């Protein structure tokens, strides 16, 4: 897949909401060559204006030139902000809508913005910022292939893309990979705090936990074995890792992760209105 977005065809692109995720996407896309003058951003607090100085960042849709007609609209505000953010877009027509909103279904997006020619849901994670994201994409059968291809181009420029055929699984993908960096950061924090509690300096504990997580992630991606086999490779019977896992972590972690995924999916369904 070509990761160069300098000749991405479905421009101009309008980004609605430039908070943590919107800014991470835009940084990544511009880093991959998406021309800044082919992008406009609606962001009420204008917080993004300084960083994206060559891009039109406006507080309200009415501040964009009247002739501005985006071919791609990316929604990246919070799901709860959808009803407030979309009325100003109501007169747009014939654009590809890409939404990264958790728990916001294709049918709700179609109802909210009937001018959209196509709707694709994307669930990225914050690692798009370093071009190592993984994004789940879902488009239903009413979506033209070219719209899905354009969304695939945008997100594969920022890491891996996984296509799902069942929208129901997108809520689970959100709890797994969208939220997932938080689980890893929490693991880093717990290891760091634990080592400090046991007498190590914060600096050394931080360097060890971060380096270990980065290296383990890389190794996991490169090896073909199941992750359980990699656990066994480190945890030889009677060794240090075996003792550490037998302290309860080996049982508690899978159980707690399952509960966390369930809770995430429940919340996504609540947002969806189920
Ligand atoms: N953060 C993640 O790791 C992550 C992962 C996967 C998916 N997502 C999805 O990404 C979306 C954004 O999440 P986030 O973490 O980036 O939240 P966030 O930091 O709160 O960003 C939301 C942005 O939308 C702006 N906004 C509010 N009302 C708006 C309006 N009427 N028109 C245009 N923009 C408006 C907010 O501006 P103000 O600050 O001025 O209110 C804010 O900058 C969510 O739907 C979430 O499900 C996030």
Image (cartoon, grey):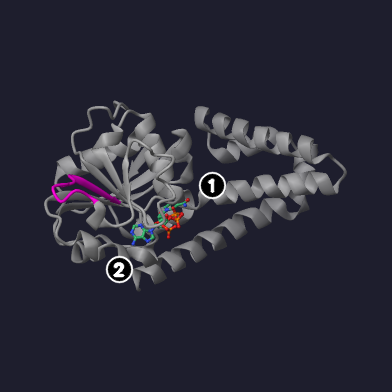
**In the image, 272: left or right of 21?**
left
Mark sitting earlier along the chain (1/2) = 2
Q: Main secondary structure of the magenta part?
A: loop
Q: Is ligand 1 within 8 Å of the beta carbon of the residue shown at mark 1?
A: yes
Q: Spatial distance from mark 1 to mark 2, Cα to Cα?
A: 28 Å
Q: Is residue 98 above or below residue 266?
A: above
Of 10 and 242, which appears nearest the observer?
Answer: 10
Element under disc 2 = helix
Magenta stretch? Answer: 64-74
**Position of residue 233 in the picture relative to residue 31 (left or right):** right
Pick out the residue farthest to the bottom: 274
Instruction: Return the x and y of residue 129 as percentages of the image width and height.
Output: 46, 38
To which quarter of the image does residue 191 belong?
A: top right
Q: Residue furthest right?
A: 199
Residue 140 visible in the displayed image? yes
The residue located at (55%, 30%) in the rendering is: 218
* Residue at image coords 72%, 39%: 206
Q: Measuring from the top left, give residue 92's x and y in whole percent.
A: 15, 55
Q: Residue at x 16, y 40 (%)?
A: 146
Q: Nearer the viewer, residue 125 or 49?
A: 49
Residue at (40% x, 71% y) in the render? 270
Name the residue that disc number 2 marks. Answer: 83
Q: Which label sits on residue 181?
A: 1
Sort mark 2 into few (<14), some (14-19) or many (20+) by Cα contacts within 10 Å.
Answer: few
> Picture coordinates of residue 249 (x, y %)?
71, 52
Residue 156 vs 194, above or below: the answer is above
Hey, which quadrant is residue 243 in on the image?
Answer: top right
Q: Where is ligand 1, by quadrant?
A: bottom left
User: Left or right: 37 with respect to 19?
Assistant: left
């Amino acid at each position: 897949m070509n990761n160069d977005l300098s000749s991405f065809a479905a421009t101009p692109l309008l980004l609605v909401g430039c908070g943590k995720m919107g800014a991470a996407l835009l940084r990544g896309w511009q880093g991959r060559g998406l021309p800044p003058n082919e992008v406009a951003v609606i962001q009420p607090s204008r917080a993004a204006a300084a960083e994206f100085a060559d891009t039109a960042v406006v507080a309200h849709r009415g501040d964009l030139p009247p002739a501005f007609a985006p071919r791609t609209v990316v929604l990246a505000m919070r799901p709860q902000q959808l009803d407030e953010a979309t009325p100003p877009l109501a007169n747009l027509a014939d654009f590809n809508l890409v939404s990264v909103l958790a728990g916001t279904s294709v049918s709700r997006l179609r109802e909210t913005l009937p001018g959209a020619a196509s709707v694709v849901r994307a669930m990225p994670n914050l690692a798009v910022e370093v071009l190592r994201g993984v994004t789940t994409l879902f488009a239903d059968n009413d979506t033209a292939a070219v719209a899905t291809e354009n969304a695939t181009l945008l997100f594969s420029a920022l890491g891996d893309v996984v296509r799902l055929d069942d929208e129901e699984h997108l809520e689970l993908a959100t709890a797994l990979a969208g939220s997932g960096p938080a689980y890893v950061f929490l693991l880093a924090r717990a290891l760091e705090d634990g080592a400090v509690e046991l007498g190590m300096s914060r600096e050394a504990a931080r360097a060890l936990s971060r380096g270990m997580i980065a290296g383990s992630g890389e190794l996991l991606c490169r090896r073909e074995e199941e992750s359980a086999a990699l656990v066994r490779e480190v945890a030889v019977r009677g060794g240090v890792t075996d003792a550490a896992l037998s302290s309860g972590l080996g049982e508690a972690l899978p159980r707690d992760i399952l509960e966390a995924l369930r809770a995430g999916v429940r919340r996504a369904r609540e947002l969806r209105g189920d």
